[in-house]
């Protein structure tokens, strides 16, 4: 027995009994009617045969305690006598969900009746309105701040997301606890009303239900009947290795939940990376500035340089190295998506002593004397005039 039958057929009326009739009354009435319309007693009368079938169908439902209960619930939920919008006009019987669908979802905190009603009314083919169509959830943007090393290695962060979703109190129906929305009597649940303008008609969203197809008599106090509510949730999200400061990461399907069976939106996470006291980042390269002395650059040296992960590395500075020269240490940078690793870029930075002791001072003075003929600014003034 389909729900369509349940909603369109008044079995009590068929059997001529009250909705409150006791099983014995139903049985008695059925027997009386069955005898009257039995095909054997009405040979050749197709009307009687049809009537007999209707009586049998009604009795089969109402005589079964469980089925009768489902029937009563289905009808009270949809206001009874409600004409299912499957329509002879659409030509297709698109309305064939069963009671398992109908009641199965109602106990589920996340799904609930909001989605259910959406599904029901989307079966109506061309009656679907923008409001009734499944809607993809909104994209959500949030921010997180990562430690320098976590950004390089990847990490899992807890993100607190606030957004609009189905009201948890009424599970999106907009109706007060213990009640359910009623099918809009103005549009019969289609969400659309038609107006005839001379020779043609126009269809517009139903004013009484604002296109929803349902009206709420007792609004949910939490959402004042809108069925929507702001809520926050915390999700654990994996941030991939190698993200940089201010990067926007897309996490598919973690945005706001969809409506009426629509897919969830995407979550975008704007990542901020805390600076490191020593290292910097340039794409997949790490950078470090290493203080050196003038003699180390002039005479050459081997200097120990820290690496972010693991032991320090030794960088060989050749004699005559200029200040600011960059050295590349392969494989000590940030791991890339393809599995390769960037470099550590070492920049030498001469530190000039503020106080020279006696011996060092005289050595520098000797150096000045020994290099007196070399003028580093020899052609600077001339070159400044060019171009
Ligand atoms: Zn309406
Ligand atoms: Zn609510």
Image (tube, grey):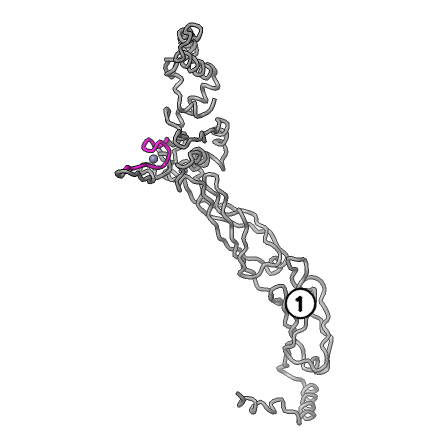
Farthest residue toward the left? 198
Asked whether 45 falls inside the magenta stretch, the response is no
Residue behind mark 1 = 344
Badge 1 local density, few (<14 within 10 Å), some, or many (20+)? many
- The part of the image, by quadrant, that contains residue 319 is bottom right
Give the side of residue 371 with respect to residue 159, left or right.
right
Position in image of residue 379 (x %, y %): 59, 91
Query: In the displayed structure, would residue 148 be above or below residue 235?
Result: below
- Residue 265 seen from this side: yes
In this rendered view, identify the residue nearer to me: 29 or 124.
124
Foreground of the two, 282 or 115: 115
> Residue 231, how many percent across, how many down?
45, 44
Residue 292 as seen in the image, left or right of residue 11: right
Residue 279, percent from left and from top:
62, 66
Task: Name the residue at 40% across, 17% down.
Answer: 11
Residue 234, horizontal then vertical, whole percent: 52, 46
In the image, which residues are magenta? 182-196
């Amino acid at each position: 027995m389909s729900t369509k039958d349940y909603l369109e057929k008044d079995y009590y009326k068929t059997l001529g009994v009250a909705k409150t009739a006791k099983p014995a009354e139903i049985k008695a009435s059925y027997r009386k009617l069955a005898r009257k319309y039995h095909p054997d007693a009405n040979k050749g009368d197709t009307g009687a045969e049809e009537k007999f079938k209707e009586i049998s169908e009604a009795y089969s439902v109402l005589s079964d305690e469980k089925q009768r209960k489902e029937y009563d619930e289905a009808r009270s939920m949809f206001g009874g006598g409600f004409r299912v919008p499957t329509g002879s006009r659409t030509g297709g019987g698109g309305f064939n969900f069963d009671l398992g669908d109908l009641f199965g979802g109602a106990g589920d905190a996340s799904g609930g009746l909001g989605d259910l009603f959406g599904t029901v009314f989307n079966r109506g083919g061309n009656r679907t309105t923008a409001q009734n169509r499944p809607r993809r959830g909104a994209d959500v943007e949030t921010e997180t701040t990562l430690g320098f090393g976590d950004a390089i290695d990847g990490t899992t962060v807890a993100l607190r997301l606030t957004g609009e979703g189905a009201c948890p109190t009424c599970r999106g129906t907009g109706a007060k606890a213990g009640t359910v929305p009623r099918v809009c009597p103005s549009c019969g649940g289609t969400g659309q009303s038609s107006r005839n303008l001379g020779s043609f008609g126009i269809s517009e969203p139903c004013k009484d239900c604002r296109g929803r197809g349902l009206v709420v008599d007792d609004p949910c106090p939490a959402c004042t009947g809108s069925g929507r509510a702001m809520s926050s949730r915390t999700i654990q999200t994996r941030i991939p290795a190698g993200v940089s400061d201010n990067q926007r990461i897309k996490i598919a399907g973690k945005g706001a939940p969809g409506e009426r069976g629509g897919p969830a939106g995407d979550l975008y996470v704007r990542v901020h990376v805390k600076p490191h006291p020593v290292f910097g980042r340039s794409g997949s390269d790490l950078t470090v500035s290493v203080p050196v002395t003038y003699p180390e650059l002039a005479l050459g040296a081997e200097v120990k340089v820290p690496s972010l992960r693991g032991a320090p590395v030794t960088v060989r500075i050749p004699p005559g190295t200029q200040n600011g020269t960059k050295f590349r240490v392969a494989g000590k940078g940030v791991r890339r998506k393809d599995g390769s690793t960037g470099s550590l870029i070492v920049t030498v930075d001469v530190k000039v002593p503020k106080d020279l002791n006696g011996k060092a001072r005289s050595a520098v003075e000797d150096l000045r004397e020994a290099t007196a003929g070399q003028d580093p600014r020899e052609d600077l003034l001339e070159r400044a005039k060019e171009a």
